[in-house]
Amino acid sequence: MAKGQLMPQVLTTSLEDAIIRSAEETLDRIAAARNAIEAIIFGQQRVVEEALVTLFAGGHGLLVGVPGLAKTKLVETLATVLGLDARRVQFTPDLMPADILGSEVLEENAEGKRIFRFIKGPVFTQLLMADEINRASPRTQSALLQAMQEYHVSVAGERHDLPQPFHVLATQNPLEQEGTYPLPEAQLDRFLMQIDVAYPDRAAERRILIETTGETPTVAKAAMSVDDLMATQRLVRRLPVGDSVVEAILDLVRSARPGEGEGDPKVTKHIAWGPGPRAAQSLMLACRARALVTGRLSPSIEDVKVLALPILKHRMALTFTARAEGLGIDDVIGQLVGLLP
């Protein structure tokens, strides 16, 4: 009888040990992947971290910055290091939805009958790089809406499933530049994170000059496989989240909505519209993923504070009065974060 009572405890302990060992192996793989990426992309540690958080959380990322900051190079490096099949689409004003999704062509089969055959577009890949996404028309931009949310596309009434995993990493030039179209709000909301890419500091730029202009530039090497990536994504969803972190996420997101009555009126008066529930979901997943990327097995309130800006800034808009007073979205989110414990 005593032996029978001990068996469940032994099984539970063994299971917990197996989970811990698996998590520790995942942390080692993540660290190796990050090191492999930073051997190619210099001086952008925050950008690399946020890109990895986006992919480990199972989401899509929007990389925003002026041309020449290695946004495209980062996406190519991520694909190689994480073992993903990747395709690149250069978005231009004349790009059509069929150029991304694919189209049906009429052909004659062996029996002489005419049939339609679907030719897959570049969206049928594991990592789609939508380069300069805001240089295409809103009609073409919206071709990715269904793919990013439902992981399949519909062409001529037929459903076509996308590969797993499926991620979109889009690059975007600042809207102030000529020849750009703003992304629809519905599409912006489908990006888990907006990753702002800034100029490197002097030391990093010096390293770029020396290491990228020589005879043999450094080549990215694989550090994870697709199976490793998907296992990491499953682990992210299994990580425990404390009540204090959940409440911090709710406090932050709900305080950013005007009219909810839960935010500081001095701050919400500057907000025209705020983030929806998808923002809270994204923040929860991103906090878990950041914990892994930084070598931890549970997220903290600090993760919420660090990720508030890239998660919320493309899901909010300021009032005209706030913009006239010189306030930026970064300033308002900073005020919201300052209200957290």
Image (cartoon, rainbow, N blue to C red):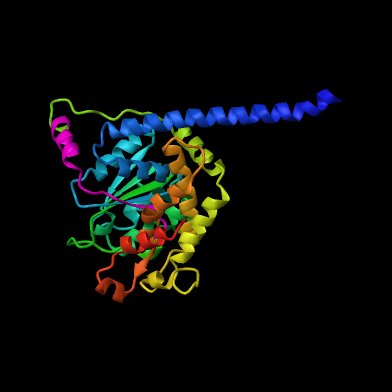
Answer left or right for 119 relative to 26.
left
Residue furthest top as drawn: 3
Which residue is found at the position 17% from the left and 30% from the top? 211
Residue at coordinates 70% horizontally, 28% vertically from top-left?
11
Direction bottom: furthest residue: 321
Residue 27: percent from the left, percent from the top?
Answer: 46, 32
Describe residue 197's horizontal placement relative to residue 257 as left or right: left
Q: For residue 208: magenta?
A: yes
Q: Residue at x 25, y 28 (%)?
A: 219
Q: In front here: 140 or 267?
A: 267
**Farthest-out residue, front:** 341
Residue 192, percent from left and from top: 41, 52
Query: Which one is in front, 129 or 288?
Result: 288
Q: Quadrant of the N terminus?
A: top right
Image coordinates for residue 329, horizontal then vertical, percent: 32, 63
Seen at 19% across and 50% down, the residue is: 67
Is residue 139 shown to the viewer in this render? yes
Quick check: 214 above or below 289? above
302 vs 210: above or below: below
State which region is magenta: 189-211
Extreme-right residue of the structure: 1
Residue 187 x %, y %: 38, 60
Is residue 48 found left or right of 5 in the rendered image?
A: left
Q: Is residue 159 visible?
A: no
**253 versus 304 height, above or below:** below
Instruction: Name which quarter of the figure residue 215 lies in.
Output: top left
Report the number of discs. 0
**Residue 135: in magenta span:** no
